[in-house]
Image (spheres, grey):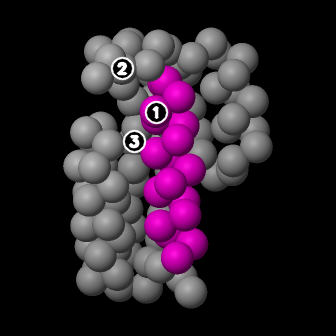
Amino acid sequence: MPRPAKLPKEQVDSWVAAHPPWAADGEASLSRTYTFPSFSAALGFVVRVGLLAERRDHHPDIDLRWGRVQLTWATHDAGGITALDVELAGASDDLYDGAKE
């Protein structure tokens, strides 16, 4: 399956503005830090994101710490942020919102 093309900077900036606390590293990647009450809650979130990533064959960089997870989405072969990254960033937020309920 071909990867989507890199999004224009204006489109990335617009998405980030509408989805705080996501941040763009220029046109290279999207990052967000999630907080949790415990290591096990953070780990559970990482597992759910990992399963999502496997289903879509697109994997984020993940930094797991006690009560904190940072996700970074990028499409390296496209040279930056694509529609797939934006989609999976939104799906990550949905998983996080579901974990809090």
* Residue 22, x across and y down, in percent: 59, 46
Tell which circle, 3 or 1, labels the residue nearer the N-terminal end. Answer: 3
Picture residue at 46% right of the left edge, 45% below the top: 88
Marker disc for residue 84: 1
| Mark 2 or 3: the one toward you | 2
- Amino acid type assigned to the residue bearing label 2 in the image: Arg
Q: Mark 3 = which residue?
A: 72
**Magenta stretch encompasses residue 93:** yes
The magenta segment is 81-98
Position of residue 49 relative to residue 54, above or below, is: below
The residue lying furthest to the front in this view is 1
Q: Mark 2 = which residue?
A: 3
Picture residue at 26% right of the left edge, 57% below the top: 50
Report helix, strand or loop for mark 1.
helix
Left or right? Give the position of 68 relative to 53: right
**Magenta stretch encompasses residue 74:** no
Residue nearest the viewer, comparing 46 with 83:
83
Q: Quadrant of the N terminus?
A: top left
Residue nearest the viewer, comparing 101 with 37:
101
Tell which circle, 2 or 3, labels the residue nearer the N-terminal end. Answer: 2
- Amino acid type assigned to the residue bearing label 3 in the image: Thr
- Amino acid type assigned to the residue bearing label 1 in the image: Leu
Position of residue 98 relative to residue 101, above or below, is: above
* Residue 78, x across and y down, in percent: 37, 13
From this viewpoint, is residue 27 visible?
yes
